Amino acid sequence: MNSIKKNNLVNCEILRKIDKSPEITQRELAGELGFSLGKLNYCLKELKVKGLIKIKNFKSSKKKISYYYILTPSGIKMKKNLIINFMKIKIREYDELKNEINNQHLGQ
């Protein structure tokens, strides 16, 4: 998988998870994605710079500051486009595998 496709897949997964659970912690999100906290932090900052998410903080207790993440309209559109492209690739791969299996059965 080339780096652009891999980056798009990473962005798509982050956007999907943020959309589903805006108050998820970075530690929880990193764990779900299998990322280090540093990698996730870098990705979140890049999504923010691109205008795809907003990061807001709130105090969940007197000792701790937490964040929640909001997809911007651009982030919602990007997430939708990434999911559509991902599904197109998977459908194409499925069709190719199906044809390969059918051709193998015809050759027997």
Image (cartoon, helix red, strand yellow):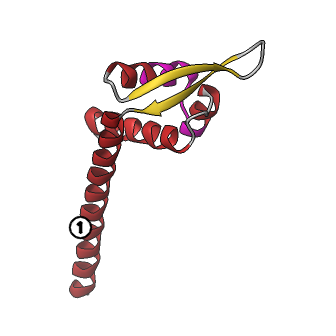
**Residue 87: where, in percent of width, then height?**
31, 57
The overriding secondary structure of the stretch rendered in magenta is helix
Residues in magenta, as a range: 32-43
Q: Which residue is drawn at 63% across and 27% down?
A: 27
The x, y position of residue 102, in whole percent, is 25, 81
Q: Closer to the camera, 26 or 51?
A: 51
> Which of 35 and 97 lies nearest the eye of the viewer?
35
Point 26% across, 56% down: residue:
89
Image spot of residue 88 (x, y percent): 25, 58
Residue 54 in the figure: left or right of residue 80: right
Disc 1 is placed on an element classified as helix
Q: In which quarter of the image is the N terminus?
A: top left
Against 26, residue 92 (above or below) is below
Q: Which amino acid does label 1 sit on?
A: Glu
Using the image, determine if residue 18 lies above or below residue 49: below
Residue drawn at x 64%, y 33% as measured from the top left:
28
Task: Residue under label 1, please give it.
Answer: 96
Q: Which residue is drawn at 55% across and 36% down?
A: 22
Q: Look at the image and tell me in which quarter the C terminus lies.
A: bottom left
Image label count: 1
Q: Where is residue 47 in the image (x, y as percent from the top left)?
A: 38, 25
Q: Quadrant of residue 46?
A: top left
Q: Quadrant of residue 21?
A: top right
In magenta stretch: residue 92:
no
Could you tell whether 47 is left or right of 104 in the image? right
Can you name the residue that lies furthest to the right here? 62
